Amino acid sequence: MPDRASASALRASPPEAGSQTAMSHEHAAAPAGQMATAGQAVATWLMKVFPAWLVLWGSYSREFWAFPCFDVPPGTLLHAGNANDLAGMMHRLQRSIRGGR
């Protein structure tokens, strides 16, 4: 679960291969290969910030998918069209599991 260091890492820039802005739906016309590479790089970056999660980039859906690797109700998963939205959802779920601390 992220601590203060992880929270500051969220404000840091993602890898050069893609950015949170570049991974939004407004860039849906980007070539599939570029989009997949950038999406995978951002997913890897998110897993470094949130080590208790498996984050995948869906090349077809063009969305990020996050699977918690901690005790949550069965079937819990998150998805979003951009990294900022997904990171916010991941953080909120972790806080709710910890009791809002």
Image (spheres, grey):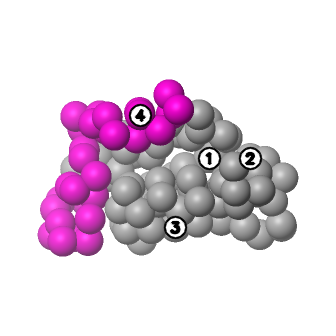
Rounded to the nearest angstrom, the CA distance separating label 1 from label 4 is 20 Å
Q: Nearer the viewer, residue 84 or 16?
A: 84
* Label pair 2/4, CB-CB below 8 angstroms: no
* Label pair 3/4, CB-CB below 8 angstroms: no
Question: In the image, 19: left or right of 95?
Answer: left
* Label pair 3/2, CB-CB below 8 angstroms: no
Which segment is the magenta one? 4-33
Q: Give how far across and how far down residue 95 sits, in percent.
A: 66, 54
Location of mark 3 (residue): 79
Q: Give how far across and how far down residue 101 sits, in percent.
A: 69, 49
Kindly identify which numbered label has been placed on residue 69. Answer: 2
Location of mark 1 (residue): 54
Residue type, numbered disc 1: Leu
Q: Quadrant of residue 42?
A: top left
Residue type, numbered disc 2: Cys
Q: Give how far across and how far down residue 80 sits, in percent.
A: 45, 68
Q: Look at 83% across and 67% down and name the residue there.
A: 74
SS at circle 3: strand
Query: Is tag 3's residue or tag 4's residue first in the polypeptide sequence?
Result: 4
Extreme residue in the front direction: 101
Within-10-Å neighbours for mark 4: few <14, some 14–19, many 20+ = few
Query: Is tag 3's residue or tag 1's residue first in the polypeptide sequence?
Result: 1
Q: Look at 77% across and 69% down and name the residue there.
A: 75
Question: In the image, 98: left or right of 82?
Answer: right
Rounded to the nearest angstrom, the CA distance separating label 3 from label 4 is 22 Å
SS at circle 4: helix
